[in-house]
Image (cartoon, rainbow, N blue to C red):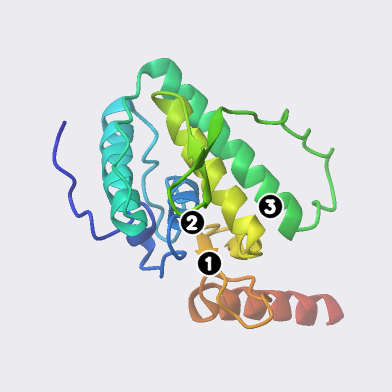
Amino acid sequence: MPPASDSALWPATARYDLDPAPGGLGLVQDLLNTLPAGAPRQPDLLDDLDSATQWAHDVAARWSTVTGRPAPDVTLDPAGLRALRTFRDELRYGIDARLHTAPESGPPEPAPAPRATGATLRLDGNGSVHLEPAGAGADLLVSLVLAELFEAQLTDVGRRIKTCRNPRCQVAFYDRSRNNSGVWHSVRVCGLPTNLRAHRARRRQAD
């Protein structure tokens, strides 16, 4: 397997110069950020098997670094890549549905079917219970993402993973505001220009 380009970074999130989510929750953010987003648009890291395999290897190395657990061996095949892209869309759909209101026009987009995956509970020597992902290939990666998101929900930080409200951007970010009120991945890059465009549109309408 090819060496990771930089195991000190979450490979997809680093493309947007974002601070990563803490701990293993960065895996959730990084999967979301494999999508083409930002300005200018970055390529889709799950577009083909070669780039997806490199991303999976790099993200497994980073996950191992931040969690102190062995890096999973994630081997993707064409069917697994298609399943991973579908799961990414389902994950983004769920986060967007929680954060953003439905569009004013057009029929509502149907919700994806509930996602299920394998995992086990393990009791360690200190009496602590750990959720252990299971499976192989894309199934293992999906299990890792869901396990990290589940554990983040238990500590009420999972809801801080958001997608930028700017439709021209939509990168996934971790909201570090005290009251979890952030809607832009960057107020300077996306918030101010979007608000300015809305202000000008209201002025034109009033005139």
Query: As rendered, which of 93 and 136 lies closer to the eye?
Result: 136
Identify the residue shown where x is 45% and y is 24%. 135
The reply, left or right, for residue 63 in relation to residue 107 is left
The reply, left or right, for residue 198 in relation to residue 29 is right
Q: Against 8, is 73 above or below?
A: above
Q: Residues within 10 Å of mark 1 (few under 14, many from 20)?
A: many
Question: What is the three-letter code of the residue carrying label 3?
Answer: Asp
Label 3: which residue?
96
- For label 2, the SS is helix
Quarter of the image for residue 107 reads: top right
Identify the residue shown where x is 54% and y is 44%. 147
Q: Earlier in the sequence, mark 2 or mark 1?
A: 2
Looking at the rendering, in which quadrant would you find the C terminus? bottom right
The image shows residue 31 at horizontal and vertical percentages of: 46, 46
The reply, left or right, for residue 39 in relation to residue 202 is left
Label 2: which residue?
25
Q: Against 195, is 113 above or below?
A: above
